[in-house]
Image (spheres, coloured by chain):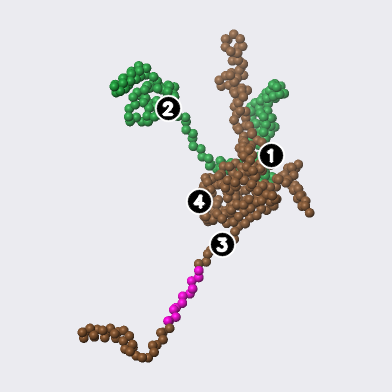
């Protein structure tokens, strides 16, 4: 009696599944399986039965995020970063740390907005710039002056 | 019976025999021969114990503060860790752990020397784009004045990064000094500070230094600071290792202290740091830059 009941239940289930063939992907969390449908799991598959990829007739390719390239945190530059930043305090104030900054001459140990940077570049380096670059710099200074001093809320 | 008797007689004569029958008083036993005396073996002398290395603060510690203490070791042997005691000034090695100051100073160190060279061309700098592409009205297309405006493909960028930009700024001197003090105090509090009387090593083999660091459980990375020149052995050993760095005392900074797990200071470096860092507590403000010669404030009058 009980055995017959279970057999009936199983047959009903199989029929339902056969007609409807619901996409298992919605329950398993990804949107489209690329056409694979649920099929009875065969033993000996490469994927364990507990994973969402178990029991699919065609293996779905899952794309992983790209792996981070290995970064050596102990190169000479990284190990010695920041050394001599306190050379003023610890060294009798003969050297200022801003003299250790490597960069364009008009920017060493100085900070400004774009207009100030352009003006300082013109003052310090303008006479040895290329003609086209000098012309573009002048155009930029003119444009920024008008923008900062004639437009907007702060003028 | 006669043979037995003869055997007994033989045995008797082999023993004391006829002497037992004499009545003379027995001779005194012969005195024992004096044994050949060996020279006495002196007890093993223990190796001479060196006198302990003691270091007191050069800058006087004002009560109610009292100096902190730390063990002084050396690098001559992996187990030579208890050579003496050193006093450390509490205003340098015992300040409260201000993590916000550490963050401020570390961020300053990262950014103040940053110069970003990112630059894109604006519509005025892109080649071309002087002519109006088509007439204003009648063509049916949208109106445009230049083929290099930011709307166009291949046009300039409107608000992009412009030119080499510097992010330079300076924190107040006292904040940077306090950052160093907080970092040193944190190293001492977390048992990551080790004192050493000198940096002499028996060999310049990097493996010896690595083995020493592992035996003493110093961690992955070690920062070794000295105020004088380094001996050749430790220079050779550290040049073969990536995460053991040697720096002079001038080069001490918060970023390196946070990057390396352990700090090894010589006593000379401790004196140097205490003197330089404690000067700021009792100095005049710089009306004239400190690079010029100046006079220190007079010492406070002692109560009579």
User: Chain for mark 2?
Assistant: A
- Is B145 covered by the magenta stretch? no
Q: Which badge, 3 or 4, comes first in the chain's sequence?
A: 3
Mark 1: secondary structure:
loop
Q: Are marks 2 and 4 on the same chain?
A: no
Q: Is residue B18 above or below residue B161?
A: below
Total count of labels: 4
The percent coordinates of residue A21 (x first, y second) are 37, 19
Q: Is residue B169 above or below residue B280?
A: above
Mark 3: secondary structure:
loop
Mark 1 closeness class: few <14, some 14–19, many ≥20 residues within 10 Å: few
Q: What residue lies at 68% left-to-right and 26% top-to-bottom?
A: A141
Q: What residue lies at 64% left-to-right and 30% top-to-bottom?
A: A130
Q: Nearer the viewer, residue B248 or A115?
A: B248
Alpha carbon distance from label 2 to label 4: 47 Å
- The hue of chain A in the figure is green
Per the image, the residue denoted by label 4 is: B215
Per the image, the residue denoted by label 1 is: B172
User: Chain for mark 4?
Assistant: B
Mark 4: secondary structure:
helix
Alpha carbon distance from label 1 to label 2: 54 Å
Q: Nearer the viewer, residue A51 or B10?
A: B10
Chain identifier for the brown-coloured part of the image: B
Per the image, the residue denoted by label 2 is: A62
Alpha carbon distance from label 3 to label 1: 49 Å
The percent coordinates of residue B74 (x first, y second) are 56, 54
Q: Which residues lie in the magenta part?
A: B32-43
The quarter of the picture where residue B23 lies is bottom left
């Amino acid at each position: 009696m009980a055995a017959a009941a279970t057999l009936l239940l199983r047959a009903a289930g199989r029929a339902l599944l056969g007609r409807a063939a619901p996409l298992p992907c919605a329950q398993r969390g990804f949107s489209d399986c690329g056409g694979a449908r649920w099929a009875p799991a065969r033993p000996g598959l490469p994927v364990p039965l507990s994973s969402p990829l178990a029991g699919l007739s065609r293996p779905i390719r899952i794309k992983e995020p790209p792996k981070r390239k290995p970064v050596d945190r102990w190169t000479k530059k990284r190990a010695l970063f920041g050394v001599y930043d306190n050379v003023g305090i610890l060294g009798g104030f003969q050297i200022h740390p801003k003299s250790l900054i490597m960069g364009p001459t008009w920017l060493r140990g100085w900070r400004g907005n774009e207009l100030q940077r352009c003006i300082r570049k013109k003052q310090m380096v303008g006479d040895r710039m290329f003609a086209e670059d000098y012309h573009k710099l002048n155009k930029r200074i003119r444009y920024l002056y008008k923008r900062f001093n004639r437009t907007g809320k702060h003028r | 019976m006669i043979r037995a008797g003869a055997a007994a007689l033989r045995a008797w004569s082999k023993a004391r025999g006829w002497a037992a029958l004499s009545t003379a008083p027995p001779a005194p036993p012969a005195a024992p021969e004096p044994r050949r005396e060996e020279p006495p073996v002196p007890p093993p002398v223990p190796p001479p114990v060196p006198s302990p290395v003691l270091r007191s603060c050069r800058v006087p510690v004002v009560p109610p503060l009292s100096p902190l203490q730390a063990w002084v070791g050396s690098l001559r042997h992996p187990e030579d860790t208890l050579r003496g005691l050193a006093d450390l000034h509490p205003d340098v090695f015992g300040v409260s752990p201000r993590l916000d100051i550490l963050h401020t100073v570390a961020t300053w160190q990262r950014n103040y020397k940053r110069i970003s060279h990112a630059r894109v061309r604006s519509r005025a700098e892109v080649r071309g784009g002087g002519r109006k592409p088509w007439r204003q009205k009648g063509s049916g297309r949208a109106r445009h004045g230049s083929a290099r405006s930011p709307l166009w493909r291949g046009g300039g960028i409107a608000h992009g990064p412009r030119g080499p930009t510097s992010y330079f700024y300076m924190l107040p001197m006292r904040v940077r000094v306090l950052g160093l003090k907080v970092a040193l105090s944190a190293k001492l509090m977390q048992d990551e500070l080790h004192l050493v009387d000198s940096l002499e090593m028996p060999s310049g083999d990097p493996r010896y230094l690595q083995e020493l660091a592992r035996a003493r459980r110093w961690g992955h990375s070690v920062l070794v600071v000295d105020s004088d020149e380094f001996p050749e052995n430790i220079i050779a050993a550290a040049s073969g290792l990536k995460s053991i760095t040697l720096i002079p005392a001038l080069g001490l900074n918060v970023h390196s202290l946070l990057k390396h797990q352990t700090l090894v200071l010589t006593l000379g470096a401790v004196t140097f740091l205490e003197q330089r860092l404690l000067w700021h507590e009792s100095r005049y403000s710089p009306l004239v830059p400190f690079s010029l010669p100046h006079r220190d404030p007079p010492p406070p009058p002692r109560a009579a």
